[in-house]
Amino acid sequence: MIALARALVGRDLLLAWRRKSDVATALLFFIIVASLFPLGIGAEPNLLRAIAPGVIWVAALLSSMLSLARLFAADHADGTLEQMLLGAAPLGVVAAAKAAAHWLVAGLPLVLIAPLIALQYDVAADLYGVLALSLLLGTPVLSSIGAIGAALTLGLRGGGILLSLLVLPLYVPVLILGAGAVEMAAAGLSPQGQLLLLAAMLIVAAAFAPWATAAALRISLE
Amino acid sequence: MTTDSIKWFWYASPQTFFPLAGTIARVCAVLAAILTVAGLYVGFFVAPTDAQQGEVYRVIFIHVPAAWMSMFIYVVMAVWAAVGLAFNTRLSFLIARALAPTGALFTFIALWTGSLWGRPTWGTYWVWDARLTSELILLFLYFGFIALQAAIDERRRADRAGAVLAIVGVVNVPIIYYSVKWWNTLHQGASVSFSKAPSMAATMLTGMLLMALAFWMYSIAVAMIRVRCEIAENQGQTTFSEAQPPA
């Protein structure tokens, strides 16, 4: 089962590597959205410092969501997904592997690039660690919850817009805890509570979301 | 015991449920009308004027029951959806689908009356209070459920996909509520505290409970009417497709 998951993740990573522009687009979207806020609000350093955690997190949310629509679409179009459904492998493992690959392609780059955005927002250097850690814990939750939405809206017209309506309300706790952790640290308090809750959400999402995704895939491909 | 189980499943078929739904809808509609009149009478004429808020507080006779119903209906909807997934009963999906617009309506009414009350009392239509925010997100969840069902043409897939979404949503509702509550205390935004429960005159409570019962009856009546429409619509489609000459 582990070997199967590893093979699936490897395959998705290879596919993403062959089409690098898709990955780059999501990452550029993240950077552009984050760069728009100072233009709209004004470049007052204190203001930017105050809104930085929220802006970075919202941009991460949107960027991660945009790439969700592609999570199952290609496999659905060429019939691979149906073969996975028919195959002997538990569909939950397949769903977990797809979500993990999505995180590696769309979530991890955000974690790595976030300090650069934080630099633009003049965030104190000792907050970079908390910011990166909160994104590291939070973005996998986004991928696993988002996979449920992607599976439910598979092959629907207007799937992308619908997906955002389904998934964004469910992202609210992650946003609150993720941005909250950085704000706590900025206020000189310990962000431990938020980070631990994020970790708890990650564990719960990793345990249950793949099965919900599998159920949704079965329904969508029936 | 066996006869009991047979009776339960007897009404699980849409065709046999159709007349029963009609009866339930009629009874509940009458009860809803009577209870609304009684509740509004108690609320507007019997209940005393609030010492601090004046007459404005009377919006609670609609606001609080609507807020209760908005949350309760989502849970009921998710339970029916889960029953539908577990037992593969069409009727359960029909009830879940029929409840969603009523739930969204009550959520909207709760938000709307709340902001009408907030304007004279807090001096603003909207604050990012934990309850207001989570109620707003609940409204988004209802919209998501309705939009997903509307986007899928095939009924079986629409029902089952909606059911999965409702179950995922109901698991998330408490998490959303507590995270929003925590976020709110962290931000120290609105300096308004709901938490201290004011001692309430008995007539106020009576009015509120009467209105809550009225909303219950209304919800059941409307859901039953919607279920009847859905059944009739499906029935029409089947006979229509059967009437088609073989291609």
Image (cartoon, helix red, strand yellow):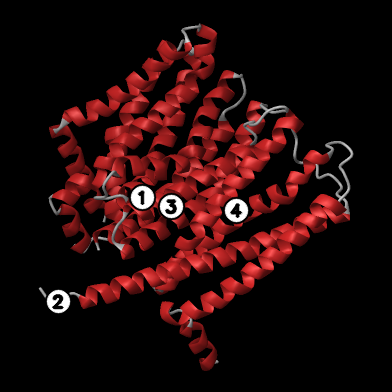
Hey, what amino acid is under mark 3? Phe
Secondary structure beneath label 1: helix
The numbered mark 3 sits on a residue in which chain? B
The residue indicated by pointer 2 is B245
User: Furthest residue to the top?
Assistant: A44
Q: Are marks 4 and 2 on the same chain?
A: yes
Q: CA distance from mark 3 to mark 2?
A: 36 Å
**Circle 3 Cα neighbour tier, 10 Å, few/some/many (<14 / 14–19 / ≥20):** many
* CB-based contact (under 8 Å), mark 4 and mark 2: no
- Whether residue B188 is visible, yes or no, is yes
Q: CA distance from mark 1 to mark 4?
A: 23 Å
Hey, what amino acid is under mark 4? Met
Residue at screen point 44% across, 36% down: A138
Q: CA distance from mark 3 to mark 1?
A: 13 Å
Quarter-of-image position of residue B178: top right
Q: CA distance from mark 1 to mark 2?
A: 41 Å
The residue indicated by pointer 1 is A148
